[in-house]
Image (cartoon, helix red, strand yellow):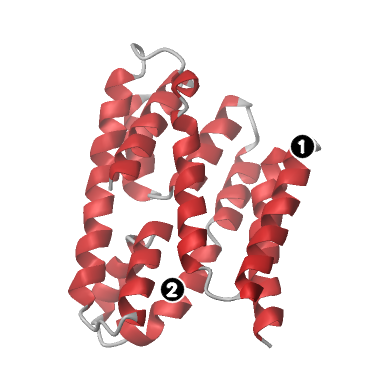
Amino acid sequence: MGTVIVVGTTFGVVARQAGLEPIEIAAMSLLVFAGAAQFAMVGLFAEGAATPLIIVTVLFLNLRHLLMAASLRPQLMRLSLGRRLLAAFVLTDESFAMATSYFRRGGTSLAYYLTFAVALFVLWNLSTLAGIALGSTIGEPRRFGVDFAITATFTGIVVLAVKRPADMAVALIAAGLAGALALAGLSTIAVIVAGALAPVLAIFARR
């Protein structure tokens, strides 16, 4: 929860300093609700990227949600359509990791997932508003190292999800590829390429 507050506030600050209007930033957190994709959007907006590129980038970054949703489908099928749509909307890497761990331990209550996921949504949006308010006073947020918070969050999720040597191999290959592309100056597509490759490698590893 603490990480969400730090990252959400950082997003609000960075987006405000990138020139986005408060209403645009708040709407992005309210309607998109995807940390990595939102940071990517802000970066592309700041660089003056074309709208189609921004849309495609966000879609590629969020494709992993299809895999996460498919994994949770057996547990969520007993919900009504409206509640399934709500569960899908608040699905994030953090809520998926917590729910997967809970169900693996034998848990069956969907209230656990929904409570945690909705709480993250509320905290993210409140933190975004705080970041908007601080945007003009905090200076350069990266000098405090807060920009690493989202990286640390994803690293923690991956570490908790690794159960077998094959999982570790997939994570290391994807991380190595993303790092190599970033060092080559292709940071915009690094996450997209690595994110698309990892599920393919995981499927082959399980087979």
55 relative to 45, above or below:
below
Q: Quadrant of residue 12?
A: top left
Lateral position of residue 173 relative to residue 156, left or right: right
Residue positioned 28% across, 67% down in the render = 86
**Relative side of 169 to 123, left or right:** right
- Foreground: 189 or 97? 97
Identity of the residue drawn at 77% across and 37% down: 183
The answer to whether residue 26 of the structure is visible from this angle is: yes
The x and y percentages for residue 198 are 66, 66
Q: Name the residue under label 1.
A: 183
Q: Residue 8 carries which label?
A: none
Q: Residue furthest right?
A: 184
Q: Where is residue 135 in the image (x, y as percent from the top left)?
A: 36, 19
- At x 26% / y 31%, what residue is drawn? 129
For mark 1, give the secondary structure: helix
Residue at left 63%, top 74%? 165
Rendered location of residue 107, percent (x, y): 25, 81
Q: Which quarter of the figure has residue 63?
A: bottom right
Q: Quadrant of residue 85?
A: bottom left
For marks 2 and 1 on the same chain, the one whose residue lies earlier in the sequence: 2
The residue under label 2 is which amino acid type? Ala
Q: In 3D space, how far apart are the residues under numbered discs 2 and 1 (Cα atoms)?
A: 32 Å
Along the viewing direction, whichever of 134 and 148 lies nearer the viewer: 148
Circle 2 Cα neighbour tier, 10 Å, few/some/many (<14 / 14–19 / ≥20): some
Residue where numbered disc 2 is placed: 69
Disc 1 residue type (three-letter): Leu
Please identify, in this view, whether the residue under mark 2 or under mark 1 is nearer the observer: 1
Kind of element beneath mark 2: helix
Q: Say whether marks 2 and 1 touch (CB < 8 Å).
A: no
